[in-house]
Amino acid sequence: MGTPIRHPLVDAISSRAVRVDSRARVVRLSRPLADLLGRPPTSRRVVLVTSERSRLTVGLRAALVAAGGVWAVHDDEDRLRDGLTGLPYADVDAAATEPDASVPAAPSAGWLPLIEDAVDTTCQLSVDLTVLHRASHDTSLGGAVETLGAAVSGAVPTRWGATEPLGHAWDRWVLTQHARHQAPETVRVVVEGPHLSATITARVTDHGIEETTALTVDVTEGTLDEAIARLTDALGHIAESSLPTFALVIAREGESDRCVRAVTYPPPNPVALLIGAPSVRRLGLERSALDAGRPVVVVGRPRLPAYVVPLGDEATSGWNALHRTLEAVGPERLAQLVASPLLQAWEEDLHELDLLHESTAEAEAEAITEADAGTGSRSGGQTDGIESQAGTERPRPAEDES
């Protein structure tokens, strides 16, 4: 056997860590870094070491977390701490050590860092949403990020790519073909637009497509409560035109470029929870059981109802309401339903109840009925749903695919 060749980004290797140093002020998900983080896991964790003045893009943070990596920052005295949690580390090996969940976190370095507060932050809403789609040629990815971004700030995506800088103009058809061609591998892409940053993760199987969107949008229009209202209304639109399982909406203060810095941000606040039709049906949930302290809104379609649970707002913390809701659902049952890969966990129900087909068929029937009646209502007139948008797109050659 030949001598193993070290990845060009690796600065050091120890028994526990693969160390990667960066002096960049903005650390992006470059092609070489994406290649390193995308390699099969080993006994060593990737530890990205930067100065405390560096910031990570949304795409890099998502890829680093997905790979089980760690972001460690060193201060002016060359001491290490976790860039996200602030936990101090004695050295890089300590950073790479998997924490014991049964033991309370404690500093391994014997000192507590002084972390500056974030300044000049922007009010933002973050959404984590998972939608299940049929394995149909008409299925198109990316509709959720368009709908949610437009609701909060009037912004839509402009570029996407698997690495940064993003190499493709926004095109849902090309994005979907990229995901299909990578199957059965999981695909994660980064999406950017004015006032929004997101990652879209797609798993394409014979049973369907699982699309998870993690989106952060700046609140640029009206108050935070008005933006929350628009966003929850948009979740209702999505429940009418596709099959979401869960979504959690968080209000937060963040950087204007949606990057993350190694500083202390104000505590995030959960403001809304969407429990999709598959979850409602499988859990046998009744609206009266969800004691969140505020009226639960029924969205979706009559035969496939989903629930939007209001949690907090600009003046009220939503953590207690979220905890009460999760207790009503049942934490253990909920953990089973959101386990990855979702399509495998849901396969029995999707097959037995034919929810994906029922969702599409009912949406199409409603659209035809409302079009004939000339109502122009939101479920018939919207084109931001997964299926309705796909039906109007003209196929293109695939030369733009990455």
Image (cartoon, grey):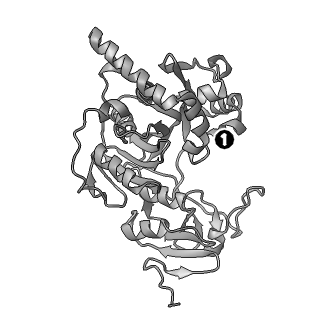
- Left or right: where 350 falls relative to 164: right
Q: Dot 1: few (<14), some (14–19), or many (≥20) neighbours within 10 Å?
A: few
At 61% from the left edge and 73% from the top edge, which residue is drawn?
44
The answer to which quarter of the image holds residue 109 is bottom right
Q: In the picture shown, does residue 299 fall above or below 85?
A: above
Report the quarter where the C terminus lies.
bottom left
At 24% from the left edge and 56% from the top edge, which residue is drawn?
400
Q: In the picture shown, does residue 289 fall above or below 399?
A: above
Q: In the picture shown, does residue 237 fall above or below 335?
A: above
The answer to which quarter of the image holds residue 67 is bottom right
Q: How many numbered discs, if any?
A: 1
Q: In the picture shown, does residue 112 fall above or below 236?
A: below
Q: Nearer the viewer, residue 116 or 62?
A: 62
- Residue 251 visible from this viewpoint: yes
- Left or right: where 77 falls relative to 324: left
Looking at the image, the residue that sits furthest to the right is: 102
The answer to which quarter of the image holds residue 33 is bottom left
Q: Mark 1 highlights which residue? A: 336
Q: Nearer the viewer, residue 43 or 28?
A: 43
Q: In the image, residue 248 lies at what x, y percent?
A: 53, 36
Looking at the image, the residue that sits furthest to the bottom is: 2
Q: Amino acid at mark 1?
A: Gln
- Residue 225 visible from this viewpoint: no
Q: In the image, residue 159 lies at what x, y percent?
A: 29, 50
Q: In the image, residue 11 lies at what x, y percent?
A: 49, 80
At 67% from the left edge and 64% from the top edge, which residue is drawn?
98
Q: Nearer the viewer, residue 324 or 225?
A: 324
Helix, strand or loop at mark 1: helix
Q: In the image, residue 219 lies at what x, y percent?
A: 38, 36
At 62% from the left edge and 63% from the top edge, which residue is drawn?
113
- Left or right: where 112 falls relative to 55: right
Looking at the image, the residue that sits furthest to the top is: 373
